Image: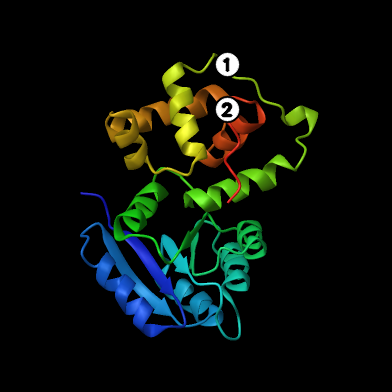
């Protein structure tokens, strides 16, 4: 049996932390190893507990979540930081990604969506809601890729792989993709592995950006 995923909760509202912990405690494969009420405390607790994942709020007194993420990633680059916040402000979103966050989730998500995001850590997936994913795609589309970074698939994507990519661009989780295409989650994972291998990419966000840039799928609509 594999070790449980070690999670650190960082939020200045103790009732919110307690609520998230209660949700996570229902899973035997997830262990909450600590909590913190501000950014500086988060850095200290992360040093002591060495978590796999940190669920980090942005708006906190003193040292906010963005600065805490920068400090933690400099010292512990292996730690995956997911911003868990009420804010979907573009500036906070892009600053969080620049600071090293692997995901950006809004607090109105459902428990299963949080579980899906945490399970995606082991697969190297970014955790983004559909609306957030669309914003990131549009931001990256405005950034020109250098000629030496242009990619070509080693072999053409299949029709099914393009269908999977379309749903990835919409910010769908593996479970949602499986339900939409009436296939198993394992099949979705295999398709994603094949897509990343063919495109020489590391994660689904890179694949989504590539798909939109190359015209393989339509640009997500503006909200």
The answer to whether residue 34 is left or right of residue 136 is left
Marks 1 and 2 in Cβ contact (< 8 Å): yes
Residue at (67% x, 63% y) in the render: 91
Q: Is residue 78 above or below residue 143?
A: below
Badge 2: few (under 14), some or many (20 or more) residues near its Cα, within 10 Å?
some
Residue at (25% x, 50% y) in the render: 2
Residue at (60% x, 81% y) in the render: 63
The answer to whether residue 169 is left or right of residue 139 is left
In the rendered structure, which disc, 1 or 2, sits on the residue that comes first in sequence?
1
The answer to whether residue 175 is left or right of residue 126 is left
In the rendered view, how is the structure colored? Answer: rainbow
**Closer to the camera, 112 or 54?**
112
Q: Quadrant of residue 45?
A: bottom left
Q: CA distance from mark 1 to mark 2?
A: 8 Å
- Name the spot of residue 24 as percent of width and height, x first: 28, 65
- Name the spot of residue 157 as percent of width and height, x first: 51, 18
Extreme residue toward the top, this view? 155
Of helix, strand and loop, which one carries label 1?
Answer: loop
Q: Quadrant of residue 19?
A: bottom left
**Closer to the camera, 201 or 210?**
210
- Name the spot of residue 159 as percent of width and height, x first: 45, 17
Q: Is residue 167 above or below residue 105?
A: above
Residue at (43% x, 75% y) in the render: 48
Q: Which mark is residue 200?
A: 2
Badge 1: few (under 14), some or many (20 or more) residues near its Cα, within 10 Å?
few
| Residue marked by disc 1 | 154
Of helix, strand and loop, which one carries label 2?
Answer: loop
**Closer to the camera, 142 or 218?**
218
Total marks placed:
2
Q: Is residue 100 above or below residue 20?
A: above
- Name the spot of residue 34 as percent of width and height, x first: 37, 75
């Amino acid at each position: 049996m594999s070790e449980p995923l070690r999670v650190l909760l960082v939020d200045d509202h103790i009732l919110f932390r307690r609520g998230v912990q209660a949700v996570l405690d229902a899973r035997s494969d997830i262990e909450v190893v600590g909590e913190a009420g501000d950014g500086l405390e988060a850095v200290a607790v992360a040093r002591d507990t060495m978590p796999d994942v940190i669920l980090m709020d942005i708006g906190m007194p003193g040292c906010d979540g963005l600065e805490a993420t920068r400090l933690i990633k400099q010292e512990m680059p292996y730690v995956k930081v997911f911003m868990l916040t009420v804010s979907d402000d573009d500036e906070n979103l892009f600053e969080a990604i620049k600071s090293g966050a692997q995901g950006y989730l809004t607090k109105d998500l459902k428990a299963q969506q949080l579980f899906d995001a945490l399970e995606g850590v082991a697969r190297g997936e970014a955790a983004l809601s559909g609306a957030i994913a669309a914003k990131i795609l549009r931001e990256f589309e405005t950034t020109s890729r250098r000629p030496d970074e242009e990619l070509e698939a080693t072999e053409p994507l299949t029709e099914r792989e393009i269908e999977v990519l379309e749903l990835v661009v919409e910010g769908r989780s593996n479970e949602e993709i499986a339900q939409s295409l009436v296939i198993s989650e394992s099949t979705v994972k295999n398709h994603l592995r094949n897509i990343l291998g063919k495109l020489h990419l590391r994660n689904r966000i890179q694949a989504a950006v590539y798909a939109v840039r190359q015209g393989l799928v339509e640009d997500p609509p503006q909200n």
